[in-house]
Image: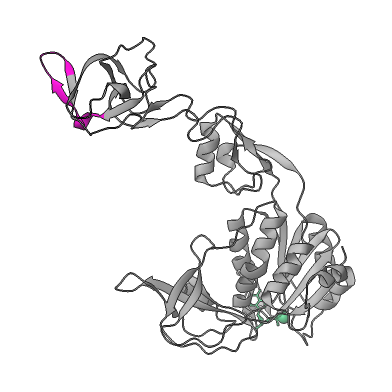
Amino acid sequence: MTLEQIASCVSGYDPSALPVAQAREFIARLVPTVSGTESVAIRSALGRVLARDVISPIDVPAADNSAMDGYALRGSDLATDAPTRLRVAGKGFAGDVVGAAIAAGECVRIMTGAVMPPGLDTVVPQEFVQLDADSGGISVPPGIVRPGDNRRLAGEDLARGEAALRAGRVLRPADLGMLASLGQAEAPVRRRLRVAFFSTGNELRSIGEPLPPGCVYDSNRYTLWGMLQRLGVELLDFGVVADDPDALRHTFTEAAAAADAVITSGGVSVGEADHTKQVMAQLGDVLFWRIAMRPGRPMAIGRIGDAVLFGLPGNPVAVMVTFYAFVRDALLAMSGAQVEPLPMLRAACTSAIRKKPGRTEYQRGIVSRDERGEWRVAITGSQGSGILRSMSEANGLVVLHHEQGSVEAGGAVDVLPFEGLI
Ligand code: AMP
Ligand code: MG
């Protein structure tokens, strides 16, 4: 689909005042999913995207087993109004299988995880049992257990043939454990997404270089590196590119040929004097948006060759906010991941915030619990889009939604916590 066709699918599309939700919808339609899968050892699969459903080849657990250390017995032997006396006929430890039939009135000493002996369906925890030293038997007080208690059933975690994990899952520690519990040494995963990134601007200097008057150190490439690293993509760093048409053309061409996505920062504002926008438009199919958001209004989006282009604004906070608002989910979708909405906290804002409906604002905040254990959020100092410190001090983004107006002190706001996101 051309960008024009995509735009026609997004209702009320207006590139000069695009609401965040519509920009997200546009991008979701734009990005392709990479093809290519590989099989990796499960310890190398953490954070990777599962390429297909994993079907359980076995019942987990494989057999009925005890959930407690105690005595396995036959539920039908339990008396309801008097102690039940049982003879201890044997022992079953974890890993043991008691094969012999157990007669009525008998029980088996059993440990957690041990397979239930044939015919026995109930486990009484050892702390409820009285031992009879003379007979070597036990006595179970009435009402302590009901038939079927403290027994784990075969296939209770997972039945054979059932999908243990679904394609598109970004694998977490529990999933690695699940794969291991199925006896799988490897996981089928999608190939890693290749993402090229670079900074544009004549005023930028790389760390290690002297800083002449009027220049700033390039911080965006480090912020971006960090954010991309957390997504587990393969990174291609193309450095700082000066405001020179040939240099820009060369780098955009190389980056687009090498990567699935190209992310740049700087040079996309309206009235920008440099050549970045011009070269983007020349080499690819690119739109220049003004998004109804703060920070992060200008952004370029489109394609150069087969790569998706995200031309982010230059301001350091705007880079991070636009990355989390648009790029993160887009890259996850490209990686084949099932993208789930990020959980937000509802917190009382400690100060009033003035805001007009009609744009989304992302303020940097510090969330904590108050004396009653309720979430509250304090806005960090200056909210200028160039002030990276506001982002560094914060532990979450206060999201003031498109339609939302001003917030009173103590009013509830949505907060996107960095934990888990960053
Ligand atoms: P621009 O969008 O290119 O007009 O940049 C907006 C502001 O962000 C300017 O003050 C730039 O100096 C600053 N800026 C752009 N790129 C970077 C970068 N990579 N690192 C730090 N600041 C930057
Ligand atoms: Mg610039």
The image quarter containing residue 266 is bottom right
Q: Is residue 140 visible?
A: yes
Residue 187 appears anywhere in the view: no
How far across and down, in percent of the image, does residue 101 sit?
A: 36, 10
Residue 115 drawn above or below residue 276: above
Q: Is residue 61 above or below residue 14?
A: above
Colouring mode (rainbow / by chain / secondary structure / one colour): one colour
Q: Extreme top residue here?
A: 100
* Near-viewer residue (383 or 49): 49
Quarter occupied by the C terminus = bottom right
Q: Give the residue furthest to the left.
A: 134
Magenta-highlighted residues? 125-137
The quarter of the picture where residue 322 lies is bottom right
Q: Residue at x 78, y 71 (%)?
A: 10
Q: Quadrant of the N terminus?
A: bottom right
Is residue 131 part of the magenta span, yes or no? yes
Q: Residue at x 77, y 83 (%)?
A: 16
What is the x, y in percent for residue 206? 64, 71
Instruction: Pick whichever, 242 or 36, lies toward us.
Output: 36
- Residue positioned 56% across, 87% down in the render: 405
Q: Residue visible at 64% across and 68% down?
A: 323
Residue 127: name its quadrant: top left
Q: Is residue 127 magenta?
A: yes
In the rendered structure, the answer to whether residue 366 lies left or right of residue 134 reads right
List the single residue furthest toward the front. 81
> Could you say where residue 66 lies in the image, as x and y percent from the top left?
36, 28
Residue 138 is situated, as x and y percent measured from the top left of the image, at 18, 21
Q: Is residue 69 left or right of residue 164?
A: left
Ligand 2 occupies quarter = bottom right
